[in-house]
Amino acid sequence: MEFLDFKNQVHQKFGLDLNSYKKKQLKRRLDNLLVKKKIANYGQFFKIITDDRKEYHNFLDYLTINVSEFFRDAKMFAVLEDKVMPELMAKTVDLKMWSAACSIGAEPYSLAIIMNELKPGSAYKIDATDLDQSILQKAQQGEYNLDAVKNISKLRLKKYFLEQSNKYLIKPEIKNKIKYRQHDLLADNYPRGYDLILCRNVTIYFVREAQDKINRQFSESLNPGGYLFIGGSETIFNYAEFGLEKIYPCFYQKK
Ligand SMILES: C[S@@+](CC[C@H](N)C(=O)[O-])C[C@H]1O[C@@H](n2cnc3c(N)ncnc32)[C@H](O)[C@@H]1O
């Protein structure tokens, strides 16, 4: 089976559209995986992931690169905490927020920590979604190594985590603020009515057409005045087409 057939079969069988991922990057990663697993060709690989659900999930894990950490790009999170959140809080009391492609949960928990710092006890909602079910389970467990929490001050670490044999467990009062569910940015409907959407370090893997579709849908999901917060190595060049305005690096506001 050629790579192209593999992509089509995966789309048919699992509804996963690999055509939206950047081709060269994707092919290089998957070629490496086949070598690593001593799999002869894409036909054999397709059979493996079709016969064994666990293998399909391993494939998803590998494909989607789950790397994340708390307050990733500390400077941009400072803009979120010092400028964007106070502006949003001044306008709306019960903010609705969405961390899309949330990976291990470090991103939505960072947001909940900011909310607690700025307005303890305030009413707000944080939805957190990812394509990968197994990473959502990890996020729900809320257990991290030192590397994931390296951007957090000692004071906040003590306040929001329990330390247990070199692991940092997010405290229940923060954990309970997040509602996790599976969502595929490339295939599922986008919920609406958000004041803030974080979608960081994922669209970089997608082709331009898919990026445009995603950004258009995010804009439709935002309330007027709401913000989209993207990753430090991502840019939306045609933001005006989607009814967005660039306010700070990484932050786009719905008009
Ligand atoms: C590099 S992590 C980014 C995590 C976090 N947003 C951050 O910036 O630290 C990328 C995440 O995107 C998720 N992902 C990849 N393709 C996706 C898709 N089509 N829909 C939703 N999530 C996807 C992966 O499972 C992974 O958890």
Image: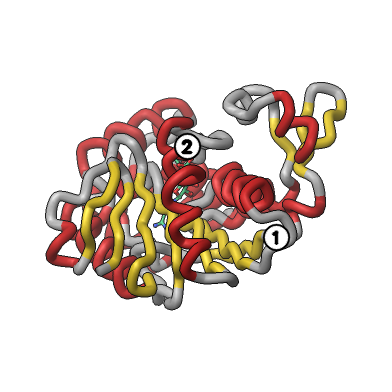
Marks 1 and 2, how far apart at CA = 21 Å
Q: Give the label, 1 or 2, closer to the camera.
A: 2
Q: Earlier in the sequence, mark 1 or mark 2?
A: 2
Q: Residues within 10 Å of mark 2 (few under 14, many from 20)?
A: few
Q: Position of residue 158 (x, y in %)?
A: 79, 31
Residue located beneath label 2 in the image: 78
Relative to residue 62, is residue 160 drawn left or right?
right
Badge 1 marks a residue whose secondary structure is loop
Q: Is residue 74 above or below residue 212?
A: above
Seen from the viewer's position, the closer of residues 15 and 118 is 118
Residue type at tag 2: Ala
Give amino acid for label 1: Lys
Q: Which residue is mark 1?
A: 177
Residue shown at 17% from the left, 53% from the top:
208
Q: Residue furthest front?
A: 90
Q: Is residue 130 above or below residue 249?
A: below
Left-right relation of 225 to 156: left
Q: As drawn, is 152 to the left or to the right of 97?
A: right
Q: Left or right of 113: which side holds 157?
A: right
Q: Residue 165, position in %: x, y?
A: 86, 23
